[in-house]
Amino acid sequence: MLQRLLPERGFYPGLMFQEAAARHGRVPVTLDRPLDIAPEAGTDLGYSELADLVDDMAGRLWSAGVRPSEHVAILKRDNADVVLLACAASRIGAVPALLSPALEGGVVAVLLDRLHAPWLITDREALMSTLSGVDITLARGVLTVDEAPGKILALAGLAGVPRRPAIRLHPHEPSLITHGPEIAGIPRLEVHSPHTLWNRLVPQQALGRATRGEPAALHLPFAPCRIHQLLGVLLHFGSPLLLLTDPDPAQAGPLLAAHRPGIVETDPHTLTLWEELADAPGGPLSRVRSYGSPFDTLPPRTVRRLLDASRRRDPRLVQLYGQGETGPIAFGWYTRRGVDRAHGRRVGTGIPGFTRIRVVDERGRTCPPGAPGAVEARTRGRILTYLGAPESYARQVDRGWWRMGDTGYRDRWGALYLLAAGELPGLSGASAHG
């Protein structure tokens, strides 16, 4: 229904800092590492400064020759400026393609080829390691965020160029590329549009309304799509931000104690590391109202310690189930009262009005409650295709239903439970799923 009523709505990352600054003014943003694109700016910034930096970088990219709909691969060490550079490319209508710095050089070469002569934004560290054996003539042009060896162009050398008006691509055009699961060792390139991103953002804004404006601490990789969606929610509600690159409790603990966030979002491994902060001096987790994490194994002891670390009346740990191809399709949560009774396989329920879940047998028939089968989802947030591998994408779609690749069952109330290989309903356990 929403798709028919609002067919042209889109989420444009290139505008989100500007819109947040206009809506909320100078809300603080704290980093644990200076930006590689602006080290002189330090670690204490705000919405307005980041919006201006995105606008500045967009002008520099345009001056370098980047144009609308062209692919811009971003491969540099993990830092918050990965998001800012993606926003800058998006702001002038280009299509950022976010590549993890953990990829091997041979894999990067294949992805650059599939991106069809993209622009490449990188840094000296990547040039000396990951890209050292890669033929960078696969790129249309190479830009660095720091010193530029040889004939490579440094973004710093383009300071002072004219700013450019923002460009919006059509809501159904490709606007962002991220990489997901591998086929024969090569990650698939997931193609998003403003419209698919908007259909992921809106339900998350609805889920986040209860904690709107709370200070938020995030430790997530900056290349995947998730960070853009989460920032879209937090910036909309005006949350002060603490963006962390180093999860080490010795480094993150003092910053968390200084900011005492109401929202903490990170991966399950980091939540386990931060369990030791539950009783740390300064109460780094004492104001947390909501922990967020992808669905994955978390020991009940860890969940309880994290929830008990908060002095808020009813803190929750919210887990989202989904994929890069779909975005979150189901959610569930733990509370202090329910953690001891929690089922380790219970993913939760679909997001009303936005996602639907079903479990089917080998012939595609819907399984009755309690019967295991393949998990499928229907969502308007599904990616457009896999770049360079449309046949692989088509194999996972059945009349609008997306095959998630997991086995599970639904109970009589519609909640989804995932199963490990060979497991039968009713057995205890837990599986990892990002």
Image (tube, helix red, strand yellow):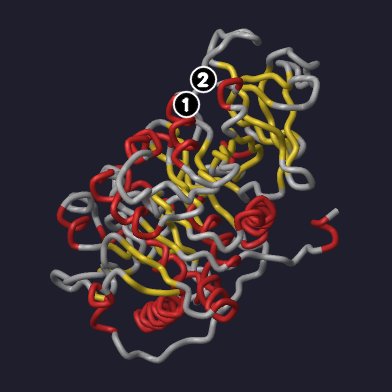
Q: In which quadrant of the rendered view does residue 167 lie?
A: bottom right
* Along the line of sight, the residue nearer the viewer: 212 or 345: 212
The residue at 50%/52% (across/down) is: 263
Q: In which quadrant of the rendered view does residue 5 lie?
A: bottom right
Q: Is residue 315 left or right of residue 5?
A: left
The residue at 51%/50% (across/down) is: 226
Where disc 1 sits, the SS reads loop
The vertical placement of 39 against 211, above or below, is below
Q: Local crowd at mark 2 within 10 Å, few (<14), some, or many (≥20)? A: some
Q: Is residue 230 left or right of residue 155?
A: right
The vertical placement of 428 against 264, above or below, is above
Which residue position holds label 2?
430
Which residue position holds label 1?
297
Q: Position of residue 323 (x, y in %)?
A: 56, 39
* Along the line of sight, the residue nearer the viewer: 281 or 6: 281
Q: In which quadrant of the rendered view does residue 273 lie?
A: top left
Q: Are marks 2 and 1 in contact (CB under 8 Å)?
A: yes
**Amino acid type for the residue under numbered disc 1:** Thr
**Amino acid type for the residue under numbered disc 2:** Ala
Labels in figure, total: 2
The vertical placement of 413 against 268, above or below, is above
The residue at 26%/59% (across/down) is: 136
Q: Position of residue 331 (x, y in %)?
A: 64, 38
Q: Is residue 322 left or right of residue 409?
A: left
The vertical placement of 431 against 108, above or below, is above
Q: Position of residue 283 (x, y in %)?
A: 37, 48
Dot 2 or dot 1, earlier in sequence? 1
Where disc 2 sits, the SS reads loop
Q: Position of residue 396 (x, y in %)?
A: 63, 33
In the rendered structure, find residue 391 and report the number of the disc placed on it: none
Q: Local crowd at mark 1 within 10 Å, few (<14), some, or many (≥20)? A: some
